[in-house]
Image (tube, rainbow, N blue to C red):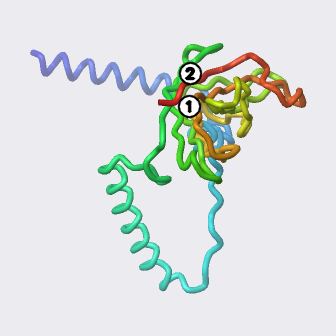
């Protein structure tokens, strides 16, 4: 009995489908649909393809070997918990100020020598307000409360990672991300998106 019911239901479904195919117009997807999908999943950084080389057969094995070496290095870095810049001198957990959803971390590398770096990683960064951008600042403990700008950015993604050169050797106490007006004065606006203290 169940087989008969299933068979008759199948015939009804086929008849309904045939009716819909005849009565509804066929609609093609927009010509730019693939481009729109790519735009949604495109990574934060623009990838520029390398020019093709004449000796492709020679390069393929070298590229494969380099990829294998890079994979081994990556596994070692992850296993040891070491950054590509080495072990950080200090870290700061970043939390949102004007936008509580923003989180992240800042790490100092070589802060006691010239050419030191601060790596700032942010998550859930909102687009900058119209006519504004974000600026990253650091504070040295002996600077008397004067923050120093180390870089600015306008996010193209909600996740942002920046490697910025420190203004010089020092004992850094804090990091801050401010909201600045485009073309405004070169001082902190007193409006912070997020910040944190190094320890």
Q: Which mark is residue 175?
A: none
Res 133 quadrant in image: top right
User: Residue 79 appears at what percent x and percent y?
Assistant: 30, 50
10 Å crowding of disc 1: few (<14), some (14-19), many (20+): many
Q: Return the residue found at the far left.
A: 1
Judged left or right of residue 144, residue 16 is: left
The alpha-carbon separation of the residues under discs 2 and 1 comes to 7 Å
User: Residue 75 appears at what percent x and percent y?
Assistant: 33, 55
Point 56% across, 41% down: residue: 119
The local secondary structure at tag 1 comes to strand
Q: Please report contact status of discs 2 and 1: CB closer than 8 Å, yes or no.
A: yes
42 over 158 or under it: above or below: below
Nearest the eye: 14 or 45: 45
Number of numbered discs visible in the structure rendering: 2
Point 32% across, 57% down: residue: 76
Residue at mark 1: 122
Residue at mark 2: 102
User: Residue 88 appears at what percent x and percent y?
Assistant: 46, 44
């Amino acid at each position: 009995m169940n087989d008969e019911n299933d068979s008759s239901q199948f015939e009804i479904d086929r008849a309904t489908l045939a009716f819909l195919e005849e009565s509804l117009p066929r609609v093609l997807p927009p010509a730019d649909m693939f481009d729109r999908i790519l735009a949604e999943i495109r990574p934060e950084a623009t990838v520029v393809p390398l020019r093709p080389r004449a000796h492709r057969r020679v390069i393929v094995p070298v590229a494969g070997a380099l990829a294998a070496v890079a994979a081994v290095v990556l596994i070692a870095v992850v296993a040891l918990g070491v950054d590509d810049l080495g072990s950080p001198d200090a870290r700061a957990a970043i939390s949102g100020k004007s936008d509580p959803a923003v989180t992240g971390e800042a790490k100092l590398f070589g802060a006691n020598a010239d050419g030191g770096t601060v790596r700032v990683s942010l998550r859930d960064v909102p687009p900058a307000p119209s006519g504004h951008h974000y600026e990253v600042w650091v504070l040295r403990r002996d600077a008397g409360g004067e923050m120093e700008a180390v870089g600015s950015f306008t996010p193209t993604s909600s996740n942002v990672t920046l490697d910025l050169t420190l203004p010089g050797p020092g004992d850094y106490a804090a990091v801050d991300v401010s909201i600045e007006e485009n073309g405004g004065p070169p001082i902190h606006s007193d409006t912070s998106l997020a910040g944190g203290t190094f320890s």
